[in-house]
Image (spheres, helix red, strand yellow):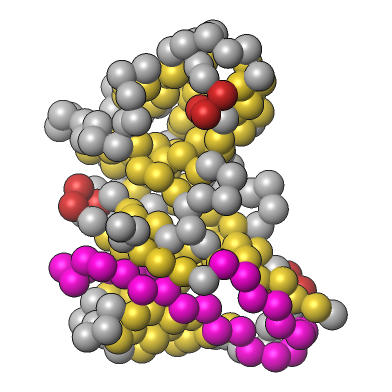
Amino acid sequence: GAGVSQSPSNKVTEKGKDVELRCDPISGHTALYWYRQSLGQGLEFLIYFQGNSAPDKSGLPSDRFSAERTGGSVSTLTIQRTQQEDSAVYLCASSLARQRQAFFGQGTRLTVV
Amino acid sequence: GEDVEQSLFLSVREGDSSVINCTYTDSSSTYLYWYKQEPGAGLQLLTYIFSNMDMKQDQRLTVLLNKKDKHLSLRIADTQTGDSAIYFCAESKENNRLAFGKGNQVVVIP
């Protein structure tokens, strides 16, 4: 597609439920990133995928968070047993390998009630 | 401590210049970036500067980099109402990930 696409754009879930957030990167981009933006905070790095290499999961805040990238394209971020502090905008970005210009999607606004 | 620090709020009159400042910590960062986020939207890359440059100009935008002080600034000339947004500076880290500041909200007064 023309840009990074994320779905859903908004998600309201009950505390304790699991959620899945989807990211479709720009076609041909081998690098994919997930960030989290909380109210009044900057962007917090979560996880990074590069081609077939093992992902850098160093930013995941707890073992309730996981992500996968299938076929080197679409990525899914899963949050299990959601907590209220998980409420945030989750942003996905992609870039070409070795190119530092990352393009961001519109984000998924997650609200845990 | 924070990797990247920014002040939080700037109010400017339409037609004036805006200057947003940022300090970063990683002297090995290869690239430094400015992103713009309009309400309800994702992040838009505005401009970036390679670490061996002191200045980069792109139309109304001027980026200044002081590597010695690890200080980055963005100047917007002839600020327009469409420039109202949150501006994030970011530095490149290992694995190509970006470390962002908390952002600086710019409000343009007509």
Quarter where residue B23 is shown: bottom left
Quarter where residue B60 is shown: bottom right
* Up/down of B19 relative to B22, above or below: below
Asked if residue B19 lies left or right of residue A103, the reply is right
Residue at coordinates 42% horizontally, 41% vertically from top-left? A35
Residue at the extreme right of the image, as rendered: B110
Residue at coordinates 40% horizontally, 57% vertically from top-left? B100
Check the picture and name the quadrant holding the C terminus of chain B. bottom right
* Residue B66 x %, y %: 30, 86
Residue at the extreme front of the image, as rendered: B1
* Up/down of B55 relative to B84, above or below: below
* Number of numbered discs visible in the structure rendering: 0
Asked if the stretch drawn in magenta spans residue A17, the answer is no
Asked if residue B42 lies left or right of residue B15, the reply is left
* Residue B38 x %, y %: 66, 57
* Residue B65 x %, y %: 33, 84
Check the picture and name the quadrant holding the N terminus of chain B. bottom left
Asked if the stretch drawn in magenta spans residue B32, the answer is yes
Q: Nearer the viewer, residue A66 or A101?
A: A66
Asked if residue A50 lies left or right of residue A10, the reply is left
* Span shown in magenta: B8-33
* Residue B34 x %, y %: 45, 68
Asked if residue B2 lies left or right of residue B28, the reply is right
Q: Nearer the viewer, residue B1 or A97?
A: B1
Residue at coordinates 60% horizontally, 62% vertically from top-left? B86
* Up/down of A52 relative to A79, above or below: below
Residue at coordinates 59% horizontally, 45% vertically from top-left? A39
Residue B18 appearing in the image: yes
Quarter where residue A26 is shown: top left
Residue B34 appearing in the image: no
